[in-house]
Image (cartoon, rainbow, N blue to C red):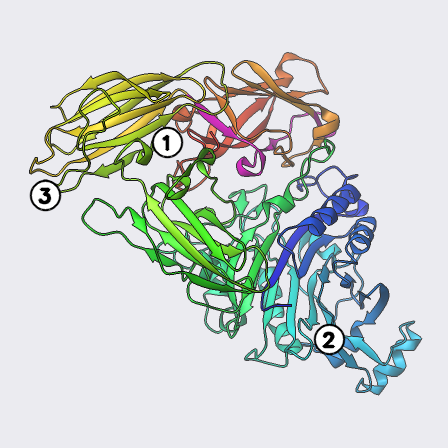
Amino acid sequence: MTSSLRMLTYNTQLRSWAMQVGASPGLTLPPIDTAEIRAKILADKLKASAFDYDVVALCEVFDEDAREILADELKTRFPFQVTKVDYDHVRVRRNGVDEMVPLLATWNLIGQPHAISSGYRLEDGGLMLLSRFPFETCSTAALDPGIAALLPQMGMPLPADIPVVNFWPYEDTEGNDGDACKGVVYARLRPHAGGEPLHVFASHTQADTNVVEEHKSARSAQMTEIGAFVKACCGGYPLTQETFVCGDFNVLGEQSHEHVGIAEWASYFAAPGHDLTDQLTDLWGVHQAPGEPGARDPGHSASVRYQPQSERLDYWLASTTSQLAAQHLSIDYELSEVPLGHEDVSYLSDHKPLRIDLNRPRPHSTVESAIEVLKPSPPPSWPQYHPDPEWLVEGQVIWYRFDEKGTYDFDLTTQHGPAHLEVYLDTDLSRRRQQYRKETHPDFGDKFVLTSAPFYVKVQPDTRSGELLALFRAHRHTGSGPGDAIQLAYGDQVSEAFPSGGQRLNDDFGATGWSDADTKWFRLDGPQVDVGRKLKATITITGSGTPFAVALARESNGAWTLEDRQGPGPTTYTLTTELASEDMAYVQVSRADGLTPGDLAVSILAEVDLSVLLGGVRGEPRIICQTETSGWGADDIELTVNVDGVQLKHIDNDTIGDFDQDDVRELRQYFPDPIPYGTGVEFVVTELDDTSPNDVGRSMLPVFGDLLGFGKFVAEPGPQPRADGTIRGALNIPVDDGVYAVQVTVAQWDETF
């Protein structure tokens, strides 16, 4: 094994039948008969994951059959397992052999933070920990004689040595959480023979039910217990060996640079004197994405039924003394997505899995330490970036940060081994941006259109062994010709400047039949999917005062035609055109004279009569019962979705399930991604208990430009549109005397188009 370490934490929502049937209304429960199916899907995905996990920590594995499926399916890949934790024991599996380890022994030999009074609970702790590394072991010879004599009488005979595992059940719980033996599990692992151990803790703390911070008093006590338990198991503070704590903490995650006023996060992670601040650190909110001026990704990992409905609840903490760099924390969307062919399963969990890639530190190996790719000032911006080649060893990565949005070409060449590059917006460090239309410039590399900045490029080896030499190059389009044209994304305003001091941008492009010297080229494309009509496009060009002219041109088989030409003279122009699928139109902006002394800067906005509803894991569509309709029992609903008057999907009641007050269902399994529309997307909710007309609710999702002013649409808190150009919110659908809401993400432009 190399210095690379890759781990995962995931709240699986694999609840037992007793928990599901006995739960109070309002919990976000999926259908009660899918736990085994979802466990098998998760196991298959973990085995096939290209991320190649070393350690996996799971929460809410309460269903016994699901637990057995996970343990059995993953025993080859992860032969060292904590399969169950409860109020008096830990169950482990080592190389296929099952063992029960009494907590009386582990507390005496490994660590007990303080006396405990809690006992039996209706449910176990729901935690599993799976490892490809072996457990450390300890001799039981030093066990307190009284405990050694007592254990056989309790039916827990003790072998000569036991794996170094431990569990601490929480004393303070509130509400339904008191039925489960919630706590924190510990395993001491040995990644390298003869090397130092790895300490891993995983927990699932007190959940809120109706409002954020509702049960923070109980959770605060639990978070203090985590610190005390870590100290007891690791031999005291400061921590001298690699220690990580993960899990679903049910704390609304914030960012250290952008604290929004919720006090709980700061009380743990920005409070000197608390163990979680002094001895451990929140790797996401304090380091990777601390908020502006750092990366702004909020890291939402879970959906809840109260506001805000998208939250970061899942965490990786590292010891403040850690000698490993957190190269990348990210949500494993691939792992969370239900594969095709499972119409009876809409989603795997109400949480998303959070992964971490660790390695020995090197310059620029984390988002926090990324190389800043600077540009000269004043404009024009730099066109090319050619750093020195970098040696990458045993899975170590290097990050680059770009502070200017635009059209880019990226190229990566390697020696001695394969590597790849990944592009991320700073507002989403989990989902890669896509290469634009698979276009590649023969000199500069693969094309990307980035409508938000800062953004990041990560260069990473394909394997975690050996070393290679990587050469990364970047080119920013300046519009010097059609091959260097700046891409116009629908709804995104592009600002560009010409060279100053009388310098011409370029000479006349001979292929056209008109003069186009000292001209910036921009490109506007029709969608790659056929929307059944041509798009009407309006391009508005505004200048800074220096005279300029504009033109609209097309090219076909090397022949250029001029559709429109205006100026020189005014400071604002409007061009219109129509775009069919795969059409390309070029906008030219020309100074009246390349030697004009005044500097020219222009802004261009291209708008089309098209909106895009994002589906799948990107759009995260879901439906929420905000107010249940009157009558007996749950609402038996079905959902129909019509796009521009044509049915896209009908989801019957057997598939979507019955709804009680505040129930949530994910819809991403049923919505393709993306969904283009021109007039509106209609959502029809039918309550099947009654066939009267008022038991059918209809709401139309309007086009992007009308969305924020629409009365039935409630935008999520924060700036809208968001930094990536999308709008996120909920469309309310009145049904009789109840209200349903569909959470959606809408855009005007999508890079896959």
Q: Is residue 628 magenta?
A: yes
Q: Nearer the viewer, residue 93 or 45?
A: 45
Name the spot of residue 91 as percent of width and height, x first: 81, 65
Residue that extends furthest to the left in the rendered view of this protein: 597
Disc number placed over residue 136 in the picture, else none: 2
Quarter of the view holding residue 395: bottom right
Name the spot of residue 661 as percent of width and height, x first: 65, 35
Name which residue type carries label 3: Gly
Q: Nearer the viewer, residue 105 or 578?
A: 578
Q: Judge depth for marks 2 and 3 and give the one in front.
A: 3
Name the side, left or right, on which 259 lies relative to 512: right
Name which residue type carries label 1: Ala
Q: Could you classify mark 2 by the number of other residues whose Cα lies within 10 Å: few (under 14), some (14-19), or many (20 or more)? A: some
Disc number placed over residue 489 in the picture, else none: 1
Name the spot of residue 478 as percent of width and height, x first: 27, 39
Q: Could you classify mark 3 by the number of other residues whose Cα lies within 10 Å: few (under 14), some (14-19), or many (20 or more)? A: few
Q: Is residue 149 above or below residue 350?
A: below
Name the side, left or right, on which 46 lies relative to 577: right
Q: Is residue 412 above or below residue 83?
A: above
Q: Is residue 23 magenta?
A: no
At a point 83% along the width and 49% down the height, the residue shown is 65
At a point 67% along the width and 13% down the height, the residue shown is 692
Q: Which region is colored magenta?
A: 610-636
Q: CA distance from mark 1 to mark 2?
A: 55 Å
Q: Is residue 707 above or below residue 211?
A: above
Name which residue type carries label 2: Glu
Secondary structure, mark 1, is: loop
